[in-house]
Image: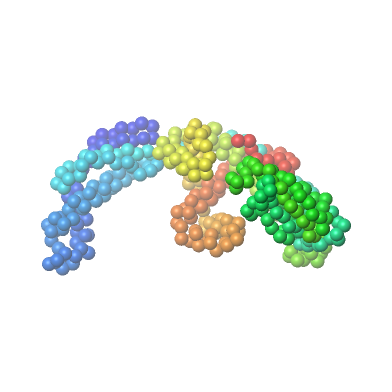
Amino acid sequence: MFKKEKIKDLHYSINGVLSAAEIQTAADEILAEYGKKAKMPGFRTGHIPLSTLRQKFGQTAYAEAVDKLLNADMQKFAQEKELRLAGAPKADIPKVEVGADVEFSLDFDVLPKLPEFDLEKFNIVKKVASVPDSEIDLAINNLRKSRAQALKQDDKYKAENGDVAVIDFKGFLGDEAFEGGEAKKHHLTLGSNSFIPGFEEKIVGHKAGDEFDIKVKFPKEYHSEKLAGKDAKFEIKVHEVRKYDMPEMTDELAKEVGQESVEKLRSHIKEILENQYSEASKSAMREEVLELLSDKVKLDLPEVLVQQEFDMARREQEAKGIKFDDKKERKDAERRVKLGLILAEWGQANKVEVTQDDLQKAIWAEAARYPNPQQVFEFYGKNQNALTMLRGMIFERKSLDAMIEKVKIKEKTVAADELFKQPNV
């Protein structure tokens, strides 16, 4: 079948010929399968002569036979050469005619063999940070705020940041009121930055019963073209000012959130924060190992995989309206492909497995981020491709974590803000 073979790095070009005889034999097998279900006038199903089937379906069966033979021989070739294809071969078949030999060429990339590397020679830093009491206090205060009530103040009280002002407002461009710029008894939390810049700040210091005008400027990037960058005036009337009254943190309040006491609550919060610190530290170690793998492991890359990754990045960025930097994205695509191949090969060689429990935990973790978790469960239940991608992500993470167990680690005590600092890109 294969007459000529040309190899360049990880790319193969193969030329060959399928004889008419072998194609016809394979086509007759396909026609026999057709005949089991085909219905034709004058014949019972399953009793149609082969000659009649050839007349009716011969061209289609011949073409299917070519595909079948090419796939079978390609699989045999890959097994004999101990090759693993990086993607489906690209076939070039100039002409397929019943009763004639078929010339063809196949082009394909193969996956590289992972070179040996010694993880024990990799040195990484494990950042360790203690949870400060201030973090626990902040979490406690956020809990108190979530249960705070905005209480109406007397008419002499002047609004401060964090208070709720109940206001009427009406907006004008020049002397003309604009659409959507008016509301009655709107509850505005001052300092929330929910209104355009300068608006909330000009409410601060006013009290119930005040009526006044404020002048502001709409941002240039405002969603309404009619208002973007324009100077505006708002007529304001303050009906009342409400101040949040935060409850004291007591054992009773702690029981409302499932803890026996304030002390137990603080311990619970500290444990949660310690887990977050630990995961942040591990995430940084994963990134460090990836950087070392990218730098120290030399690996030829199948161009077909790099191009797929590159094209996908282009589509995603263009859909978001982001300017595409070909040179940078090509380099990033090569890095992602390289690391993906290393983790896949190393993980398989070291018997890393993704269990059903791993999948379930990952799906539950994602579902917890959505208001309707059931939609996430249904999505993965119906979408096999998404489940396969999730499995791949888990496999790579578990491979990385297994690598971390083999590298040399030096602990470094850092402040909490350094632990969560994003690396410079």
Q: Residue lying furthest front in this view?
A: 175
Rendered view: 239 above or below 1:
below
Report the residue at 78% width, 60% height from top: 239
Residue 23 location (% of width, % of height): 19, 48
Q: Nearer the viewer, residue 257 or 115?
A: 257
Q: Nearer the viewer, residue 198 or 164?
A: 198
Examine the image and state in which quarter residue 267 appears.
bottom right
Q: Is residue 33 left or right of residue 89?
A: left
Q: Is residue 213 left or right of residue 97?
A: right
Say how the picture is coloured.
rainbow
Dividing the image into 4 quarters, which one contains the C terminus?
top right
What is the count of numbered marks? 0
Q: Is residue 91 left or right of residue 54?
A: right
Dividing the image into 4 quarters, which one contains the N terminus?
top left
Q: Is residue 340 left or right of residue 52?
A: right
Residue 337 visible? The answer is no
Residue 4 visible? The answer is yes
Q: Residue lying furthest right in this view?
A: 156
Residue 366 location (% of width, % of height): 57, 56
Residue 370 location (% of width, % of height): 59, 58
Report the residue at 20% width, 63% height from top: 38
Report the residue at 29% width, 34% height from top: 5
Examine the image and state in which quarter residue 118 appears.
top right
Report the residue at 68% width, 43% height from top: 231
Q: Nearer the viewer, residue 410 or 193?
A: 193
Residue 403 location (% of width, % of height): 57, 43
Rendered view: 228 above or below 250:
above
